[in-house]
Amino acid sequence: MGIGSPSLLGKMKDKAVEMVKNAEKIGRDDPRRILHSVKVGVALTLNSLFYYYNPLYDGFGPSGIWALVTVILVFEFTIGATLSKCLNMSFAALLAGAMGVGAKYLGGLCGDKGEPVVLGILVFILASILTFMRFIPGIKTKYDHGVLISILIFSLVTVSGYRTEQIIQFAHQRLSAVAIGGVTCILISVLVCPAWAGEDLQNLIAANIEKLGRSLEGFGNAYFRFPKVEGEESGSTEKALFPQDYKSAFNSKASEESLAIFAWWEFGHGEFKFRHPWKQYLKVGVLARECASHLQALSGYLNTGDDQAVQTLLLLSFKSKIQEPCTRMCSESSQALKDISSAIKTMGQPSPAIQDHLRNSRAAINDLEVVFRSSSLSTEQLFEIIPCAAVTSILIDIVNCVDKISKSVDELSEKAGFKKPKEKSPSPPPESEDSPESEVVVAISIIDKDSLESENLQEPRLEQKSQELIPGERTKIYS
């Protein structure tokens, strides 16, 4: 089959169309990605002036290329990631450059023959120590990039400095180029449509919790749905009613951890103050994955078409008995999760309605216990209702898990200082146009005066006065 064969050209065309569609989807999912690509291009173009503009090239020489290298190494999607790499690279370059200059002078004291030996030993020792330090968890999570740049800068300054006598000027030019490249990345990242890692982490956690609520509500509608039409495919319908959105909580663990690390580097902005409790978001994420694992277990109890055919009358009868409390547990817990998600997204204190939903869920659990206690079943019958019993047990675990998520979000709101909801001022009662306020006062004073008389004479006089003072409002006075 040749290169110009129709089948090969067709496959290449299909592959190209697929790549274009994937690129379009990536851009539509988050338009900030397109903007980030443009910002990187602008930063590289600006720093390329070190070579294109003669006065800059005369001042930095070939070391100006390090400004471009810095942009490529440190410019990331979020501000936190960019700041992390910029600061790591700046301090690492400064420290490694100073050690490289010191190594050069130490090697020079050993003469022409001893200098390369001393430099080689120092490179070996420092590279080995710093490489081992990268395995330390605390350093790897936040300072791994800086340690790596330290090894690179020290090795370059030490080795290349062996062939030059102006080691101070050489190191100064490279460090200045690195600093200029880093400052360019930070300014463009902060000033041009900034993407904050903290906001992305908050939105990711809130979205995962909201998806848990949708999946839980869908399970309640799917599991307790009985086929109404003969021959209706129950399994496919139940799977459609039960969305699999909860699985996103499993796939977001790495993203949550990296965003929390990058958010730690960001300075205060908007509602996110200095020393914002980013670790608390990770605790909420862990509880969200725990809830997602319970939903994953529930998905195994959705009936397929074959399972629906073999269900016994006892199982269907018992399932109908627990339908109301279980459905209530699903709907109330689902609404609680959605309210928690809204509180995280808006950075407002959790609504009191969340506790109301949780209380309703616990009341449903009590009703479920009554159903189980009132059911007198034999041992064989108990084995038949095991699937329903397992579902109820998992639902109770989900209610407890939602309660844990609520408490964790309450702790987050206290540490982060979530804003309190604005209290609505009570609206004044509507005034009737037909009954002015002065007339109402007169009518009341008359009622007080006549109340001293006998009960038999009170009603006619009140009726007469009301007709004189407020025509058409007789019913209001009697009320």
Image (spheres, grey):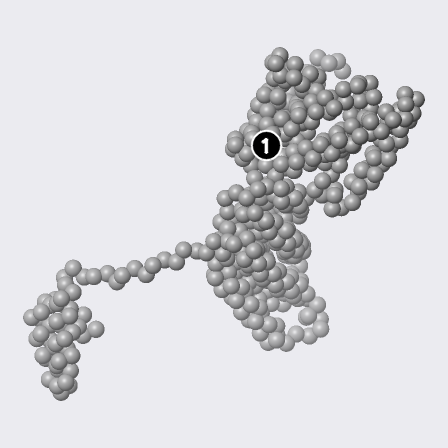
User: Which image quarter: residue 172?
Assistant: top right
Q: Residue at x 13, y 72 (%)?
A: 443
**Residue 37: x percent and y percent?**
59, 27
Examine the rendered structure and indicate whether residue 228 appears above or below residue 170.
below
Q: Residue at x 9, y 79 (%)?
A: 461
Q: Residue at x 26, y 62 (%)?
A: 429
Q: What amino acid type is highlighted by mark number 1?
A: Ile
- Nearer-the-camera pick, 225 or 42: 42
User: Which image quarter: residue 103?
Assistant: top right
- What residue occupies the far right of the structure in this picture? 113
Examine the rendered structure and indicate whether residue 130 appears above or below residue 293.
above
- Nearer-the-camera pick, 431 or 365: 431
Query: Can you see residue 423?
Result: yes
Local SS, label 1: helix
User: Which image quarter: residue 380?
Assistant: bottom right
**Residue 383: x percent and y percent?**
70, 68
**Residue 129: x percent and y percent?**
83, 38
Query: Can you see residue 330?
Result: no
- Nearer-the-camera pick, 372 or 316: 372
Identify the residue position indicated by label 1 in the image. 186
Mark 1 nearby-residue class (10 Å; few <14, some 14–19, many ≥20): many
- What residue occupies the far front of the structure in this picture? 109
**Residue 213: x percent and y percent?**
55, 53
Is residue 223 found left or right of 475 in the rendered image?
right
